[in-house]
Amino acid sequence: MNWEDVRDGRAATDLFRWVGEPSRDLETEAVEADWTVWLLDTSAVETADDFYSEVRAAWGLPPWFGDNLDALFDALRDAVAGPSVLIWDGSRAVEQIGGSLAADVVRVLRDTIADAGAFAVILRDDPLADVIRTLE
């Protein structure tokens, strides 16, 4: 599957592993197609607290944003209005934290995709192992 089909509405949004050109400017392409873009880079996180701090900082969430999965889902659900894409680098670091955080975050992302309609998640930079669909 390719990004153009998702971006242009010819293919369903989902959680994708990016296998295309690493230097491709997905953010600019999405903005030019009138998509809202959310960026997240968790490559330096080592704890669950680090993960939630990075989410808060990257998305400009208020200090009272809860460091939990319900708050993450609520923040995404409230923010996704119209076509939106989360471009996530460093997701493997979340998996390496241990416990169920990575699987739980993936579940929240999939729930948001199902709930929001036009919401895609693209994982780049050594993505989580359980992401099956690929995008180029």
Image (spheres, rainbow, N blue to C red):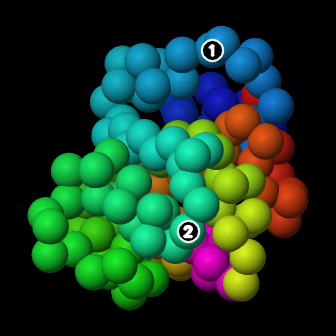
Which residue is at a point 62% across and 78% down the rendered structure image? 101
**Magenta residues, start to end:** 100-106
Residue at the image position 69 percent from the left and 84 percent from the top? 100
**Which amino acid type is shown beneath numbered disc 2?**
Thr
Instruction: Examine the rendered structure and indicate whether residue 107 appears above or below residue 32.
Output: below
Comparing 105 with 4, the one in front is 105
Q: Residue 40, percent across and down?
A: 46, 45
Question: Is residue 117 at least partly visible in the picture?
Answer: no
Q: Percent position (x, y) of residue 80?
A: 31, 58
With 104 as the anchor, is 92 left or right in this view? right
Spatial CA span between label 2 and label 1: 30 Å
* Contact (Cβ within 8 Å) of mark 2 with mark 1: no
Query: From the viewer's perspective, is residue 125 above or below residue 60?
Result: above
Task: Tell how many labels.
Answer: 2
Looking at the figure, which quarter contains the C terminus?
top right
Q: Residues within 10 Å of mark 2 (few under 14, many from 20)?
A: some
Residue at (35% x, 79% y) in the render? 67
Please, what secondary structure does the residue beneath circle 1 have?
loop
Which kind of residue does numbered mark 1 sit on? Arg
- In the picture, the disc for residue 47 is 2
Relative to residue 112, is residue 25 depicted above or below? above
Give residue 68's quadrant in the image.
Answer: bottom left
The answer to if 103 sits in the magenta stretch is yes
What residue would you read off at disc 1? 24
Q: Secondary structure at mark 2?
A: loop
